[in-house]
Amino acid sequence: MDDTFMLYDLKVEVVATEKPMVCSHRVGDSFLVQGENLVFPADTSFSMYSLAALLPLLPAKQRELHPNDWMLSDTEIACPDPNCGARFKITRVGRRIQSHGQCTVVPLVREKEKDND
Ligand SMILES: [Zn+2]
């Protein structure tokens, strides 16, 4: 039985606005999201407060979304510091085939099987 599914790989990158940045962000600083992993380039730092604001959005951005879903169209996230002008641009940079069995020990249950319960 095929237990694969697709997730997008993401890139999260600091972009500037007309408003100055208050935090330690540097334009172009970035990290990748590959499956469950955050991958930071060497010599890159990233604000933990900004990361906390971004984390809830990343699993949704990894997945196929309805074409009308705002989660698909909105790609720039503001820094949680209201005085900081930084934005974080989330871009889909690739596709990754994942295996259900390699992500969890919970068995797959198909919809038909659930209906029979
Ligand atoms: Zn900031």
Image (tube, helix red, strand yellow):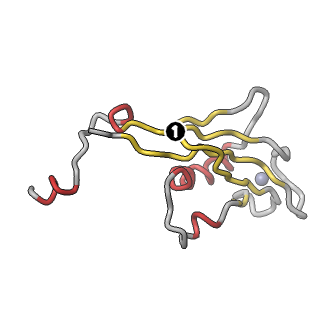
Decide which of 68, 56 is in the foreground and name it: 68
Identified at 57% across, 37% down, the residue is 34
Locate residue 31 relative to residue 109 in the image: left or right.
right
Q: Give the amino acid at mark 1.
A: Gly
**Label 1 crowd bin: few (<14), some (14–19), many (20+), radius 10 Å:** some
Q: Position of residue 29 (x, y in %)?
A: 79, 41
Q: How many marks?
A: 1
Residue furthest toward the left? 117
Identified at 37% across, 31% down, the residue is 102
Identified at 81% across, 49% down, the residue is 23
Identified at 58% across, 70% down, the residue is 70
Locate residue 62 relative to residue 48 in the image: left or right.
left
Q: Mark 1 falls on what kind of element?
A: loop
Please give the residue where the numbered disc 1 appears in the rendered image.
35
Snapshot quadrant of residue 18: bottom right
* Whether residue 17 is situated above or below residue 45 in the rendered picture: below
